[in-house]
Amino acid sequence: MFRDMYCTRCGSTAMPKEGLAGGFFFELFLWGLFVVQGAFFGGNGLWILLLVVAAAYSGWRHSTKRRICPKCGSSDIIPVDSPKARQSRTDSDCASRDVHSGENGAAAM
């Protein structure tokens, strides 16, 4: 099971999801071309090429599983306890405190 990770893109800390590289609809399109070619134009041999391309793409796509941020979908995630994650979270906490103290100071005037 995964542990919490820190997303360097959006700054969220959460349990990552598992994602696949590539696109589902492109994979579906390739398999659709193979089926249509085989069903209607099966005699010309192009279906073999489409089968190889669709199978290669599907194989590559399903062999490149990766952990992604559940909030933004980025694969730029690092362990929560890493030095970079701790520094980034500390910097964002300081920045949010500065913004809030600035708002309170402006409201007091």
Image: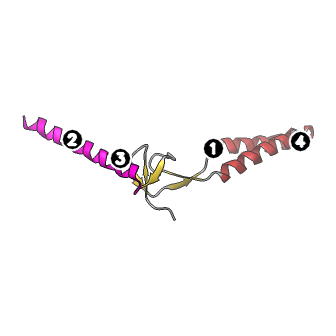
Quadrant in which the C terminus is drawn: top left
Q: Which residue is mark 1?
A: 22
Q: Which residue is mark 4?
A: 42
Region in magenta: 80-109
Res 42 quadrant in image: top right
Please state which amino acid type lies under the numbered disc 3: Ser
Residue in the image at 73% along x and 42% along y: 30
Towards the viewer: 32 or 23: 23
Residue in the image at 46% along x and 45% along y: 72
Q: Earlier in the sequence, mark 4 or mark 3?
A: 4
Label 2 vs label 3, nearer the camera: 3
Q: Which residue is mark 3?
A: 88
Residue contact between numbered discs 1 and 3, judged by CB atoms under 8 Å: no
Cα separation, mark 1 vs mark 2, equals 41 Å
Secondary-structure class at tag 4 = helix
Outermost residue toward the left in this view: 109
Residue in the image at 64% along x and 51% along y: 64
Q: Earlier in the sequence, mark 1 or mark 2?
A: 1
- Magenta stretch containing residue 85, yes or no? yes
Mark 2 neighbour class, 10 Å CA radius: few under 14, some 14 to 19, many 20 or more: few
Cα separation, mark 4 vs mark 1, equals 28 Å
Label 4 vs label 2, nearer the camera: 2
Q: Earlier in the sequence, mark 1 or mark 3?
A: 1
Cα separation, mark 1 vs mark 3, equals 29 Å
Return the mark for residue 98: 2
Cα separation, mark 4 vs mark 3, equals 57 Å
For the stretch drawn in magenta, what is the main secondary structure?
Answer: helix
Q: Earlier in the sequence, mark 2 or mark 3?
A: 3
Please state which amino acid type lies under the numbered disc 2: Asp
Image position, residue 20 (x, y; %): 60, 50
